[in-house]
Image: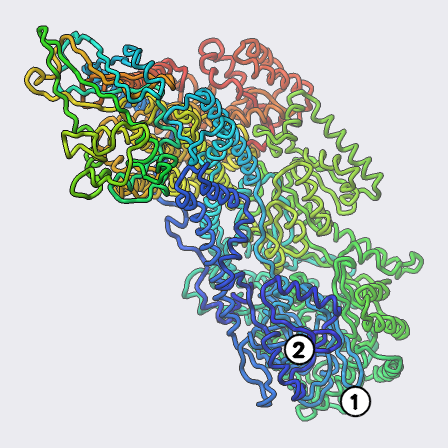
């Protein structure tokens, strides 16, 4: 049973229930003790039995994530809902209605909307809670084996019955029910493998180890004999840490570490059976403590909306105040004496004084006008967001077949933020790249092996998915030599077997996925596994192996090997063993693998047997014991293990030294046991071995080594078996593994080399650190010189690799003398056994041994770019997003990946900031800034743009032209300086001017600091995307955090707001869904404000005609339910489904995204515009009926009901004007709303003549509907009310359409024309890059196309398209103006801007139409081909400037002219580098200009004054 | 929490793909109409709207113009009575007043007689609610608990019937119309009933059940401003007495504005008046009871005919015409600009 704490006194161990209680309890316990004591539940004394039963209910594994119980639901839920201020406000108003002096409505009725809103929310909460309850129940009723004291065996129990102190037995593939201390394992080494995918998503297996002392037990673990007490930390949420002691009965203590703990939620793998004692149960398990629910963020739009809600409140108060004062005056005008009969005295028969009357009226007015604050706004927004999230979830395009994962929205309330992102901060590895590490090339001892075949093979994999499953490996096979042929073909066979079943289903990706799942090993796609070796290196390896074999058979010392071969040998050994890769056979407990190879190698000599006693197994694995001696063998082996690695004392150290000495003697015949080795690559079991690595790099290296026949065949905690060509299996005894950490950036293993019996340290790490740790080589002796040479060579190759975008790792080795080792061992053991600052000490100890290394070589691993990354980045950038890459990789690698994914362009200037000190950093920044400034201040327009960019104004997005020429690369150290408060502004100023920013070598903290800096200083909307734990902080800091649910675990996903399977999905998520969500919500919010204001204003106007008495002509029912029922559905539908621009257009024209960034759909003035429009509309809707019924016998409700009807029509028609797409849902919701209103009105008006005091609209609607005036009023009022808006929208759509409207218009074009236009525009973009080849090869074809297109167009004569051309291109033209290398009018330029330009003009008489688009298509071709034939001549150009000047003299072209003047002057001064190709066409253009200028030039140019300039910059964007 | 989705790996293959359905709804690809608001597409809308509004407007104006109406402010003409009524102590002094007027042309068809009030805020919030519908439905209710306060009971506890401020302030002038025909004076026959909504008369208002009306109202008292109890509102017609008196019902239907008219009588189309009111001289004989000067109100008596579109108010027709003209002009202007090339 569980002894909670407090010195084993059986302190309260309460059943975890809800977080509050848990927290309380934890607090309480913390007061009592800092640790927890756990004892076996089986040891209870009989008298404690009663106590136990009492506690049984307390400490259980029951999971309870529900918030409410049946009883507590109502109060608790209400309490929570009243945290929302709006709810309190509305309840307050409803309660106000109960005060007779101020009441406006029937009090019960006034409560209805609030209750409705509360009920909707409550039902939603209840439903969520219920589903939580169901899943809790399911989990609680899972079964596991718990040891029963009475039955003396493990019996099946529910999870919820498991308690702290229980013994639990788990079998392979079972899920761990609680946090369990591992006490026994069927694995001979006391290991247990777990898969933590449920916890962190990592699919690789992790090793857990039985607590040391229990490992030594000879017999099977018996829970009844467990008498120890476990003292450990109190529950905490740190998954990577667990500390404690186990105190045995004899008083001995053993340390407990994270390796001993099995975490709840993980799955047992590869281990037949384990048992352990429950340490933390239920809500105290680390998994549950880590599980914090979805995050709540407030979106930017919502913040803006809240500000406007405050304005609404202000307007409301002003209206109320106005009414109150008006009423006071009204009362006052009748004086004390002459009270009119219609001024009803109070219930006591006394008249109110004007002041009191106005105070009362103020309150009444608040009730009457309450609709001004949209009660349903928040609920509607919530509903709309849920629906939006639903649709994002359902998007097929965001589904990744390969991993069978789809987008997850973890934050429900920031969908619209996706549409406003300005900065993207991206991780590199795993985000931009696949995180599939593929071995590409290596250098060993200064010689580079380029692995060309391997590169070819990889190229095959990059082919699209259409390839057949086996095609890739086979293709890779073509160039194989015999030696590996068999090996490869085995694998191919194997794979085809494994996938045969899936092929039936068809899709390759599906098969891929299935195979991934079935294998359940990480990082093992064929691409990563099948490496084609470099022939030269392979030869050397074989040679080396042969030598070794000869030497061994001749018992020669190893040193006879040439240094190069020696290095090669060590290099591969290091690749194979310097890692934590686990070897498994699929679907089998690990033990069997081991048995198998043990049996393969029977004991041949007595020496072998003796050697078992020594800690150093000098010989290969083939020397293992026979089956009969297995048991003893095992225990011996354990002895050795404990000697070496347990927390031991001085004596063991001494013993060790003895043994070392002994084994040195044995060394002589260390070669003798090779007979039993298995031939290379034989047997299918080799193909079945799987490598499970913690990081993909490791796996890649192991696979690479295997390609050279140096394969890892087994790994135990203390030994690694390597199979080598000719040599067979060698067993390396692993003395220590110094794991990887991000500070050291390297890992090492300390092994005893079986051939030389030396103690070797193999280190693998980042080149920057390894290079510093190398043994300084004296330049004196030739060997040192040689070594030095190797080092420089290697460094050169490393740089080369980095340029190729490869990840580089250095492999080094150190040979330790026995003394050195013994000395180090001492300190290391101390460190290991230390409880307090173990990590720190281990770190120090590692530093001590990882020095004076001998460089072996280096590897280059390629991290593949994910599909579509360059395109996505290009598109996102066109959308005005600034993309920063923050990576921990080294600068060269990062830069190259950046080039590969088009983040950097080869023609842009790159500013690299590498500073050694804060001072230099400051100077550098200053210089760069000045340089950039001066560059930009060349001409005034540029300057203007620069400023504009800072302000993020719509026309000059940061990514456009001027800045395109700059990229900033900064390394981690410099970044640290640049992020200092003194420098951050400068850094930001510089970074802002750059098109792309690349931060290399940055730590997670720096990443988040950068994001924070941009977010806070630039007030920009930031998005961080990453996939690994190192991105978590950045993801959390950013406004929108996106996690890639990739291979590196789930931490990033857990911290994120959205999780997407691939980087490329970001494009659709942002450009389409983000845009939609933003635009929908923005429009809906604005509409909400409008709607309520318009409705309330109607009531307000009425106050002028009823003595400001607070009466309303609209019946209370309509008033209360108007918002809730009659007018809510259409706006919800529109808010969920309206698509302002179709998805294809949003993707094709990413520039449309800018509308969200610039908040174009919901700008502060729009609120006021809507308010003014609401006022106007309400005036119309009020006064048309007013004058119609003026001085008539109409009664209050017969007049108010038409007004309500008119308001409803107006509001719905207003929405109709704003709705861009009409599906049947839109139609039906609008029609439904109207029908519902009439239905309710008719029913309500006919239902009961006395039921709804004080109002009594009996039969009003029925009578009205028989009156033609009602219809006439209802028709004219909405028409008049909406005419201005309609006209405005029309004119706007025609004269000055927004980008979005243009996009919409473009999408309306017939698809073939649209695609033609779009492709043409895309082609044009490219054509600038490679004009000549393009012109030569494609122009005839396209010319004909475009003329066809032209015809179609002329037939259509679509009016709307031409303005699009103008203003859409407007932006770009302007942007283009600003480039400092403007060349001047050229046909290409004109074409790009969609201008109908001169060459084709004579033939085209149309003044209108998107025909432009097409014609210039033609003209482009002409000029292109002409341009190709005419070489550029500066002389011609000079003469043509006279023409330019003429153009500028005409007023129409003033603007154009200034640009041209500027550009002409700059052109003259300019070096010619900028106009290599374009110049020729420029020349052509001016000729054309001349010809045309005489006659109709002016006419034709009218609409197009701005667009005749052209930058040579290739980043020309359409639209 | 993750445990929820803890599938064993072997099960993973069997698990259906998470790939979302490819349905038009889920992929947001429902067929949709995407209107474009540009001049070209909406030009016709302007013309259509214009044409429609103009035609409707002209019809409305024509029909409104065919209405004959005469409106006489008798609170001014009977200023003596007005003065008398200013002092509420004179409430029981009868004041008669006659107003002459001349009809220049015949009023053909049904002629309606209204009384009009100006500045009488019947739509005052506390006034509007000051009634008890249940009481008016003839039920025996505790008026104390209704909205009638303070016009519920007298100090001695006798409930008012009907209660509330609306009823209390009921218009109580009596107006008779006389036709001066060839120096003889003919009383124009007026219809007292059938002026109210059928549902009001038959559903909303009921007298308490009893063998005769006065006993039905036994135990109640008239409202303080009334001169006679409710069961004497129309002593001639049993079916127009008590709560179901048409004048009372019409008064109880509170008007929307401070200036309003209520239907008082209809001309009974008999004998001389079979076609309506012939042109000639007429006289209103008014028993002036209702005080209006206190709140600067005015009283009118109005004779009017009716058409399908209501009364003589031409506003709606004008509104239609203006709107139609505006729409047409906008359309034309745009068209011209498009043709001249100013607009695309």
Q: Which mark is residue A506?
A: none
* Secondary structure at numbered mark 2: loop
Residue placed under numbered mark 2 in the picture: A2
**From the viewer's perspective, is A669 left or right of A634?**
right
**From the viewer's perspective, is A1310 left or right of A554?**
left
Inspect this view and state whether residue A1335 appears: no
Provide residue A792's location: percent of width, then percent of height.
82, 53
Front residue of A1004 and A242: A242
Residue A448 lies in what quarter of the image?
bottom right
> Circle 2: is it few (<14), some (14-19), or many (20+) Cα within 10 Å?
many
Have a look at marks 1 and 2 and say if they share a chain: yes
Give the farthest residue toward the right: A780
Provide residue A767's location: percent of width, then percent of height.
77, 56
Report the mark closest to the observer, 1 or 2: 2
Residue placed under numbered mark 1 in the picture: A610
Provide residue A131's location: percent of width, then percent of height.
47, 62
Asked whether disc 1 touches disc 2, contact meaning CB atoms under 8 Å apart, the reply is no
């Amino acid at each position: 049973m569980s002894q909670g704490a407090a010195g084993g006194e059986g302190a309260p161990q309460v059943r975890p229930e809800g977080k509050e209680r848990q927290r309380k309890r934890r607090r309480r316990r913390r007061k009592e003790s800092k640790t927890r004591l756990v004892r076996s539940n089986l040891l209870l004394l009989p008298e404690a039995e009663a106590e136990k039963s009492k506690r049984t209910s307390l400490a259980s594994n029951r999971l309870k994530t529900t918030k409410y119980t049946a009883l507590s639901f109502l109060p608790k839920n209400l309490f929570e809902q009243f945290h929302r201020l709006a709810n309190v406000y509305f309840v307050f108003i409803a309660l106000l209605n109960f005060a007779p002096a101020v009441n406006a409505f029937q009090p019960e009725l006034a409560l209805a909307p609030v209750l409705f809103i509360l009920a909707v929310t409550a039902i939603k909460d209840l439903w969520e809670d219920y589903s939580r309850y169901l899943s809790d129940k399911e989990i609680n009723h899972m079964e596991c084996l718990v040891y029963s004291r009475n039955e003396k065996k493990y019996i099946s129990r529910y999870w919820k019955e498991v308690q702290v102190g229980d013994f639990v037995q788990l079998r392979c593939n079972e899920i761990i029910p609680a946090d369990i201390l591992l006490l026994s394992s069927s694995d001979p080494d006391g290991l247990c493998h777990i898969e933590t995918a449920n916890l962190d998503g990592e699919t690789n297996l992790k090793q857990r180890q039985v607590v040391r002392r229990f490992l030594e037990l000879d017999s099977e673990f018996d829970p009844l004999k467990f008498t120890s007490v476990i003292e450990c930390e109190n529950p905490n949420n740190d998954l990577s840490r667990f500390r404690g002691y186990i105190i045995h009965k004899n008083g001995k203590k053993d340390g407990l570490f994270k390796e001993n703990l099995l975490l709840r939620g993980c799955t047992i793998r590869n281990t037949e059976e384990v048992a352990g004692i429950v340490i933390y149960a239920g809500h105290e398990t680390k998994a549950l403590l880590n599980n914090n629910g979805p995050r709540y963020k407030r979106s930017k739009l919502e913040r803006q909306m809240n500000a406007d809600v405050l304005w609404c409140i202000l307007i409301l108060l002003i209206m109320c105040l106005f009414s109150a004062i008006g009423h006071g005056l009204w009362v006052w005008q009748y004086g004390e004496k002459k009270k009119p009969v219609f001024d009803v005295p109070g219930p006591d028969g006394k008249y109110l004084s004007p002041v009191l009357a106005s105070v009362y009226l103020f309150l009444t007015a608040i009730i009457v006008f309450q609709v001004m604050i949209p009660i349903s706004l928040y609920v509607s927004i919530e509903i709309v967001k849920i629906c939006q999230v639903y649709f994002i979830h359902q998007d097929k395009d965001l589904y990744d077949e390969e991993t069978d994962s789809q987008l997850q929205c973890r934050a429900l309330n920031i969908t619209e933020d996706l549409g406003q992102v300005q900065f993207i901060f991206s991780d590199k590895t795993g985000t931009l790249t696949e995180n599939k590490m593929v071995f590409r090339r290596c250098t060993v001892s200064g010689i580079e092996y380029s692995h060309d075949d391997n590169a070819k093979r990889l190229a095959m994999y990059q082919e699209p998915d259409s390839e057949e499953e086996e095609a890739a490996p086979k293709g890779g096979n073509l160039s194989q030599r015999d030696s590996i042929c068999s090996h490869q073909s085995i694998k191919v066979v194997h794979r085809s077997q494994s996938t045969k079943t899936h092929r039936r289903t068809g899709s390759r990706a599906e098969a891929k996925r299935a195979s991934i799942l079935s294998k359940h090993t990480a990082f093992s796609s064929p691409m990563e596994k099948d490496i084609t070796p470099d022939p030269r290196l392979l030869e050397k390896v074989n040679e080396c192996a042969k030598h070794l074999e000869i030497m061994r058979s001749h018992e020669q010392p190893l040193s006879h090997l040439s240094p190069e071969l020696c290095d090669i040998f060590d290099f591969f050994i290091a690749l194979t063993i310097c890692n934590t890769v686990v070897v498994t056979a699929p679907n089998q407990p690990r033990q069997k693998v081991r048995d198998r190879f043990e049996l393969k190698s029977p004991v041949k000599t007595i020496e072998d047997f003796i050697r078992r006693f020594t800690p150093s197994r000098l010989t290969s694995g083939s020397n293992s014991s026979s089956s009969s001696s297995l048991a003893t063998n095992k225990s011996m082996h354990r002895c050795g293990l404990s000697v070496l690695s347990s927390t031991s004392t001085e004596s063991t150290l001494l013993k060790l030294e003895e043994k070392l000495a002994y084994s040195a003697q044995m060394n002589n015949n260390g070669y003798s046991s090779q007979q039993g080795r298995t031939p290379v690559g034989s047997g299918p079991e080799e193909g079945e071995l799987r490598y499970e690595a913690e990081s993909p790099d490791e796996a890649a290296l192991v696979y690479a080594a295997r390609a050279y026949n140096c394969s890892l065949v087994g790994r135990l905690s203390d030994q690694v078996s390597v199979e080598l060509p000719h040599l067979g299996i060698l067993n390396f005894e692993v003395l220590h593994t110094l794991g990887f950490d991000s500070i050291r950036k390297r890992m090492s293993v300390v092994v005893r080399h079986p051939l030389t019996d030396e103690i070797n340290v193999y280190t693998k790490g980042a080149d920057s650190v390894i290079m510093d740790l190398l043994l300084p080589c004296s330049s004196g002796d030739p060997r040192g010189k040689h070594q030095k040479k190797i080092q420089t060579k290697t460094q050169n190759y490393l740089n080369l690799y980095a340029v190729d975008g490869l990840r580089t790792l250095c492999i080094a080795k150190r040979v330790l003398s026995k003394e050195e080792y013994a000395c180090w061992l001492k300190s290391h053991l101390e460190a290991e056994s230390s409880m307090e600052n173990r990590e720190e000490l281990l770190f120090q100890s590692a530093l001590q041994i990882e020095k004076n290394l001998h460089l072996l070589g280096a590897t280059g691993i390629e991290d593949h770019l994910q599909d579509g990354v360059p395109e996505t980045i290009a598109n996102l950038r066109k959308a005005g997003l600034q993309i920063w890459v923050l990576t921990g990789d080294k600068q060269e690698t990062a830069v190259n990946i950046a080039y590969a994914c088009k983040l950097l362009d080869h023609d842009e200037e790159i500013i690299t900031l590498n500073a050694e000190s804060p001072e230099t950093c400051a100077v550098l920044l200053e210089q760069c800034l000045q340089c950039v400034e001066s560059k930009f201040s060349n001409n005034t327009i540029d300057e203007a743009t620069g400023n504009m960019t800072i302000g993020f104004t719509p026309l000059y997005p940061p990514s456009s032209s001027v800045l395109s020429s700059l990229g900033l690369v900064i390394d981690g150290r410099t970044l640290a300086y640049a992020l200092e408060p003194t420098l951050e502004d400068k850094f930001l100023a510089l970074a802002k001017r750059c098109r792309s920013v690349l931060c290399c070598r940055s730590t997670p903290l720096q990443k988040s600091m950068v994001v924070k800096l941009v977010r806070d200083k630039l007030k920009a909307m930031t998005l961080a995307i990453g996939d690994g734990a190192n991105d978590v902080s950045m993801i959390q800091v950013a406004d929108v955090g996106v996690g890639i649910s990739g291979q590196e675990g789930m931490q990033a996903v857990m911290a994120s707001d959205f999780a997407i399977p691939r980087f490329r999905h970001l494009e659709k998520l942002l450009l389409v869904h983000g845009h939609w969500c933003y635009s929908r919500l923005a429009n809906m919010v604005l509409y909400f404000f409008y709607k309520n204001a318009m409705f309330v204003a109607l009531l307000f106007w009425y106050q002028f005609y009823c003595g400001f008495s607070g009466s309303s002509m609209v019946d209370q029912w309509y008033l209360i339910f108007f918002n809730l029922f009659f007018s809510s559905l259409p706006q919800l539908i529109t808010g969920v489904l309206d698509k302002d621009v179709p998805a294809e257009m949003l993707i094709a024209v990413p520039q449309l995204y800018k509308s969200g960034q610039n908040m174009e759909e919901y700008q502060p003035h729009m609120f006021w515009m809507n308010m003014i429009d609401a006022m106007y509309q309400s005036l119309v809707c009020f006064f048309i009926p007013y004058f119609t019924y003026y001085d008539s016998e109409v009664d209050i409700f017969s007049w108010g009901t038409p007004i309500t009807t008119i308001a409803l029509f107006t509001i719905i028609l207003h929405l109709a004007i704003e709705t861009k797409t009409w599906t049947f849902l839109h139609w039906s919701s609008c029609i439904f709303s109207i029908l519902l209103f009439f239905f309710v009105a008719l029913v309500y008006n006919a239902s009961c003549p006395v039921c709804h005091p004080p109002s009594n609209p009996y039969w009003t609607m029925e009578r009205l509907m028989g009156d033609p005036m009602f219809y006439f009023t209802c028709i004219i009022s909405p028409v008049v009310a909406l005419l201005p808006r309609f006209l405005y929208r029309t004119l706007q759509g025609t004269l000055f359409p927004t980008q979005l409207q243009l996009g919409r218009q473009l999408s309306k074009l017939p698809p073939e024309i649209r695609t033609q236009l779009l492709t043409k525009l895309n082609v044009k973009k490219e054509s600038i890059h490679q004009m000549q080849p393009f012109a030569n090869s494609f122009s005839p074809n396209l010319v004909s196309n475009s003329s066809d297109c032209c015809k179609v167009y002329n037939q259509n004569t679509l009016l709307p398209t031409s303005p699009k051309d103008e203003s859409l291109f407007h932006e770009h033209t302007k942007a283009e103006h600003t480039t400092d290398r403007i060349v001047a009018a050229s046909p290409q330029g004109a074409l790009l801007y969609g201008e109908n330009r001169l060459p084709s003009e004579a033939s085209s008489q149309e003044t209108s139409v998107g025909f432009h688009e097409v014609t210039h298509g033609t003209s482009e071709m002409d000029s292109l081909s002409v341009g190709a034939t005419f070489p550029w001549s500066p002389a011609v150009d000079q003469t043509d400037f006279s023409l330019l000047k003429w153009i500028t003299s005409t007023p129409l072209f003033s603007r154009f002219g200034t640009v041209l003047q500027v550009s002409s002057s700059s052109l003259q001064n300019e070096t010619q580098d900028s106009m290599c190709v374009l110049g020729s066409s420029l020349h052509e253009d001016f000729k054309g200009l001349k010809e045309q200028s005489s006659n109709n030039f002016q006419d034709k140019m009218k609409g197009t004054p701005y667009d005749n300039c052209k930058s040579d910059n290739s980043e020309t964007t359409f639209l | 929490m993750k445990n929820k989705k803890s599938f064993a790996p072997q099960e993973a293959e069997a698990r259906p793909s998470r790939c979302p359905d490819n349905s038009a709804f889920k992929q947001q690809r429902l067929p949709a109409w995407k209107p474009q608001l540009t001049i070209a597409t909406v030009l016709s809308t302007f013309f259509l709207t214009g044409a429609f509004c103009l035609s409707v407007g002209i019809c409305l104006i024509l029909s409104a113009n065919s209405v004959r109406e005469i409106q006489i402010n008798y609170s001014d003409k009977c200023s003596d009575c007005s003065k008398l009524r200013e002092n509420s102590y004179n409430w029981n002094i009868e004041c008669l007043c006659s107003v002459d007027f001349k009809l220049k042309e015949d009023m053909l068809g049904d002629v309606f007689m209204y009384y009009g009030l100006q500045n009488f805020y019947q739509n005052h919030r506390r006034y509007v609610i000051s009634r008890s519908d249940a009481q008016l439905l003839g039920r025996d209710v505790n008026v104390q608990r209704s909205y009638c306060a303070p016009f519920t009971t007298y100090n001695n506890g006798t409930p008012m019937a009907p209660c509330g401020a609306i009823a209390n302030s009921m218009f109580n002038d009596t107006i008779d119309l006389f036709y001066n025909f060839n120096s003889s004076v003919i009383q124009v026959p007026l219809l007292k009933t059938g002026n109210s909504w059928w549902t009001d008369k038959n559903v909303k208002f009921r007298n308490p059940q009893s063998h005769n009306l006065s006993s039905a109202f036994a135990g109640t008292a008239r409202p303080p401003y009334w001169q006679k109890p409710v069961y004497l509102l129309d002593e001639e017609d049993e079916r127009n007495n008590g709560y179901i008196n048409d004048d009372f019902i019409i008064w109880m239907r509170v008007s929307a504005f401070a200036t309003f008219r209520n239907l008082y009588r209809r001309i009974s189309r008999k004998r001389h008046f079979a076609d309506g009111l012939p042109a000639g001289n007429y006289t209103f004989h008014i028993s002036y009871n209702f005080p209006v000067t206190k709140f600067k109100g005015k009283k009118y008596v109005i004779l009017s005919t009716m058409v399908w579109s209501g009364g003589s108010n031409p506003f709606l027709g004008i509104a239609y015409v203006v709107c139609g003209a505006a729409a047409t002009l906008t359309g034309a202007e745009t068209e011209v600009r498009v043709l001249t090339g100013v607009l695309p």
